[in-house]
Every structure is written in C-alpha cells, then in structure tokens.
Amino acid sequence: MKSALISALFFATPLTFGQNGKLKLLPGSKILEFDQRTSTYKLIGNVRFEYQQNTMFCDSAYFNENTEIVKAFGKVHINKRDTLNLFCDSLLFNGKTQKAKLWSNVRLRDKEYKLSTDTLDYDTKIGQAHYHHGGRVESIISNEILTSRVGYLNPETKNFIFSKDVSYKGENLEMTTDTLRYLYSKNTTYFYGPTNIFTEDAEMFCETGEYNVKTGKGSLIGNASISRSSDFTSGDTLIYHPNEGYSEAKGNVRYIDSLENLRFRGEYAFNSDSLSFSFLTGNAIAEKQLDNDTLFIHADTLYNEKMDSTTKMKAFHNAMLFSNEFQCKADSMVFEQDSNRIELFKNPIVWSNEAELKGRRIRLQVNDSLIEKAFIMQDASIVMEVEKEKYYNQVYGKEITAYFEKKGIRQANVQGNAITIFYPVDEEVTDSTIIKKRMGMNRLYSSSLDIKIDSNEIESITYNNEPDGVFYPIDQIKEDEQFVPNFTWKIALRPKKIEDLLND
C-alpha cells in the first residue's frame, strides 16, 4: 500500500526527498522503492531526477540518503545547466565529495568539444574530468582530434591536460608528445617532453615549449629544430612566427640552406622569409660548400640576403675567411655567391700560397676555391717572402690587378706610383745541382707596369714608361730602402685551420 501511494505521488507530481531536499524526482520513473534498513531509494524504468543542479536520466538508480551516493545504470545521461552532457553505461556519484565515476561507453560533450573514453572521473565541484585508460577528444566546430592515454579536462575554462602517447591532429597540423596542455581560449598548446610538430611546410622538434594551433606561432625549447624543404634550423630555443614571416634562434644555433649549399652556426640568429634576409651573431661561422673545397667565413655578425637573382653574404667586424687554397682577413666582407665575387673592406689582407695582398679595399673573383683575379685599391701591395724574416719581393701602387693560377699569382698589373722591390737570383748549374744565390736588391719606380711572377719570384717586368730605379748589391742594401710604403708582413694573422677563425 505504501509503495503504491509513493508511486501515485511520483507520477502525479515531482517529488523531493533525501537529506535537505537534495534529490528531486521528475515524472517518468515506473517503480520507486525505499529500503528503510539501508536508507536507500531504488528507482527503476525511465528514471529522471535532479540532483545538485544536474538532471540525470538512466534505466535504474539507487540513492542512499545517509551517504548521499547515487548509483545509476543503463543509458545514463547527465545534463548540467544545459551546457554539459555526460553519457555512460553506469555511474557512481558521491554527493558529499561531489565526485563521480563513469564506466563503459563514456562520452562528455559541450557546445565545442566531445570526449569519448572507457572510464572517466568527474569532479563537479571544480568542473574537472579525467581519464586514465585512453581517451579521444574531438572538436565539434573544427577538425581537431586529440588522443592520449591520460587526460584532464576542464570544460568550463577550456583548459585541457593530456599525457602519455599524446597525439593532436588539426587543419594541416599534427603533434605528438608525452605531455600536452591545451588552453583552448588562447588556441595554444604547451608541451612537456619530446615533441614532434608537423605542418604543411615544416617539421619541428623540441623538448618543451608552446605552439598556437591557429597562427602557427611557436616557442620551441631544448634541442629544438625546424626543418623545411629548403632549410633547417636548430638551437637551444627557436621562436617561430610564420604569419609574420620570421623566426629567431638562440643558443648553439645551426642553420642549413640546402639551395645555396650554405651552413651557419652561432649563438643567435634571425631569419625573415618576407624580407629574404637573415643574420647570425655570437661566434658566427658560415660554411659555403664548393665542388672541391669549403669556404668558412667568420665575423661578429653574418648577414645573408636574397634580392632578385643575387644572394649576398655580408660579414661585419673582424671578418675572416678560410679555405684550403686561400685565406682572408678584414673588418668587413661581402660574398656575392651568384657572381663568385668577394669584396673586403677596411684593412683587408688576402693570403694565397706564399703571397700576402693588402690595400684599402680588395675585390676577389673566385672559381670554386681558387682565386682567379684580385683587384687591390688604394695603397695596394703584394708581398712575397723569399727568405724567412729577411727578404721580401714586393709590388706597390695605387691600384693592382693580380691574376692567379693554381700555384699562386702569375701576373700583376700596377697602376699609379708603381714600385717594385725584388731580389734577383743568380743560378749556378753544376753536374748534379742548381745553386741559387741572391745577388742584390732592385728598387724600381714607374707610373705603371706589368709583372710576371713564378713561384713568388719576379720573372719579368714590362714598364709602360721609362722606369727609374737602383740596384743594391746584397752587402750594400740600405735598410730604409728595403720596403715599399706602408710595408707590413702579417703572416702571424693568417689562419692555418678552421679553429683559428674563433681563436682570433
């Protein structure tokens, strides 16, 4: 009779029961029973009730008014303020702790995301759901899909945390990592652990950092790298702004331009795709791969510019160049890669074989790793040591154009205030040997002249007008006549190996 009365009341109007009226029955349940011994209500068939501002639907449910525990089974559905829906096959909810456990075919959905998993814990007090046995989160309004073994979701704040075998897929974007936090309000992911990012035109790696899934802006930290079709960048930290068309790299920077066969390394780099411009600083070294050699260029700052059909590398302050065939030093240097031309500014020095070239400015035309021609401007000089720290063959003028062969300088054309100082050799031939003896020093002047050189020795001189000069026997050479104006011999500055570039 009591049971029939309760059922009649239930179907007639909503019924509130439980401590402090926390559970409110809604019309629809077919059977309602109460066990006084355990203080448990049993609802069976099309169950509908409200509990702690949540509307719940299921096939059957149990509510203990002492423990405030709700158990629900079969097609369980929870609606929270019409903004969040949870579905599962069975549920356990503790009203005191406001924590729920959902099992089998678990789905959580709001207006933007839906989650599917096998088991879910949900804390209604803080609005957080988490799973530990694999889950899948999909965006309803975009193509985003995220899977992981462990996940923590806060639907209200849109703050999601995933760990273990995390995979994210979006529009032309994929990510894999160990731990990922996704702040949906900022469209930003934060990752902790080795992370791979794949976009339409780049592959990235780092150990920690952040990435905006809408703009592509990222900050990659720890063994970070960005690989694209034509270039590769790595460093301790990479900052990537694809929409703005630039990127930055900090610490142990490496950059490879595969189109130009260029490699860079330093401590800081900036690259602008929109301006076709990049620069590198901090122990900066550039490597230009040639057919038979490699050019190494070092300076305080290196710039690489691509304008129209011209690619220029500019080295500013303490610039140095090293190759197996020749070496250079200057305050600044420009390498025009398309025309194979190198320009040196302010106190430039070029070493080729045993010759040292100096002037106010030097322009080199190179072919692979060999100098073909050098144009030396203002206070131009060529110095060749013929007896260590004692005698030097020298050429000086306002301008000098030097032509090279494999063995070094073959010819030099001197224009303006030309001076030559050289030590002719007399050869005495015996049956078995050739004895070379320096007879003295020639010092000659002319407005212009042409010189042929063989193995640092003056082979012949052609004067364009009448020369003036003097010959000093070897034992009568005047010390103040031994050298051309502004003579220096700076062989100690010549880099002998790549490491010398950084030890300067």
Image: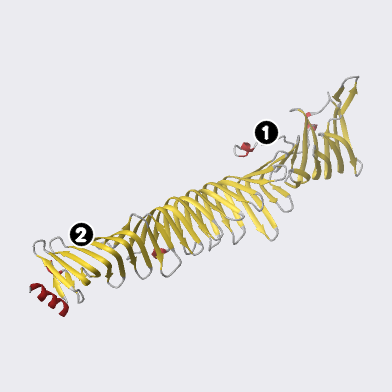
Residue 465: numbered disc = none
Query: Which amino acid is tagged 1?
Result: Ala
Residue at point 36% right, 63% down? 115
Label 1 SS: helix
Residue 97: numbered disc = 2
Q: Tell me where residue 217 appears, x and y as whole percent.
A: 49, 60
Picture quadrant of residue 48: bottom left
Residue 13 in view, yes or no: no
Residue at point 42% right, 55% down? 166
Is 333 on the left or on the right of 54, as rendered? right
Tag 1 near tag 2, CB within 8 Å: no
Q: In this view, does 449 lie above or below 46?
A: above
Picture quadrant of residue 388: top right
Q: In this view, does 380 lie above or below 260?
A: above
Residue ID for mark 1: 492
Task: Give the Cα separation between the discs numbered 1 and 2.
Answer: 80 Å
